[in-house]
Every structure is written in C-alpha cells, then in structure tokens.
Image: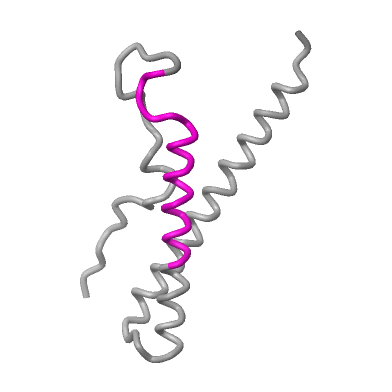
Amino acid sequence: MAIAPITSLGGLGSNVGVSKTPGAGGGGGGDSFAGLLGNALGKLDASQTASTQASQDLATGKATDVSGVVMQVERASLELQLASQVRNKLVDAYSELMRMQV
C-alpha cells in the first residue's frame, strides 16, 4: 500500500509568499490582502465541505476507503487549526497597533 505525501495543505499556506513584482512595497504590486484572504477562506470552506461530505459518504456506505476519509478529515482539521492560529496572530498584531501611542 503506497502512501501519497501531502504536497500542500491547500489552505492558507499556498497563498503566502513574496510580492509578485520586485520592489513592490504597497498598493499595486499584485493581489490585495483582502483577495488573498478571501481565496484562502474559500479554500478552507471547500475543504471543510469536502471533509463533511466524505464523512457522510462513509457513514452511509457510499465510500469504502476509510483511510482516505480519515486523511481528508484530518487535513481539514489541520487547515482549520492553521486558520485559527493565523487569525489569532492577526488580532494580536492589530491589538498591539491600537495600543501604540503616537
């Protein structure tokens, strides 16, 4: 039985990277933060939906590959944990900025 490696979580990590244009410090250097965040949340939602569907298929007998379903559910769980930690870091950073005195 061959086990395929997980190449990407398909969630937030796949969109994080360096700006698309060199030297772009602000406005027009590629995708906006809101666009990247929206795409990542869309992928997270799709992963959660697929995980739920796979679990329901296993429970009703439509799916026979238990290990595949378990891997899909665990991947969705890890993606949700990652999104939660990123959100926590963003909220902490925002709170820190709001506490700064000018």
Residue 9 is inside the magenta segment: no
Query: What residue do we see at 36% from left, 43% from top?
Result: 14
Q: Which residue ends up furthest to the top in the rendered image?
A: 102
Is 96 above or below relative to 4?
Answer: above
Q: Please give left or right for residue 40 compared with residue 96 in the image.
A: left
The image quarter containing residue 91 is top right
Query: What residue do we see at 27% from left, 58% from top?
Result: 5
Q: Which residue ends up furthest to the left in the rendered image?
A: 2
Is 34 above or below relative to 71?
Answer: above
Is 23 above or below relative to 18?
Answer: above
Q: Which residue ends up furthest to the bottom in the rendered image?
A: 61
**Closer to the camera in the image, 38 or 74:** 38
Q: In which quarter of the image is the N terminus?
A: bottom left
**Closer to the camera in the image, 60 or 13:** 60
The image quarter containing residue 32 is top left
Name the spot of residue 99 as percent of width and height, x first. 77, 21
Name the spot of residue 24 as percent of width and height, x first. 37, 14
Query: What residue do we see at 44% from left, 37% from top?
Result: 35
Residue 29 is inside the magenta segment: yes
Q: Quadrant of the C terminus?
A: top right
Name the spot of residue 81 as percent of width and height, x first. 55, 53
**Closer to the camera in the image, 73 or 98:** 98
Name the chief secondary structure element in magenta: helix
Query: What residue do we see at 70% from left, 21% from top?
Result: 97
User: Which residues, given as a range, are shown in magenta?
Assistant: 28-49
Is 58 above or below relative to 98?
Answer: below
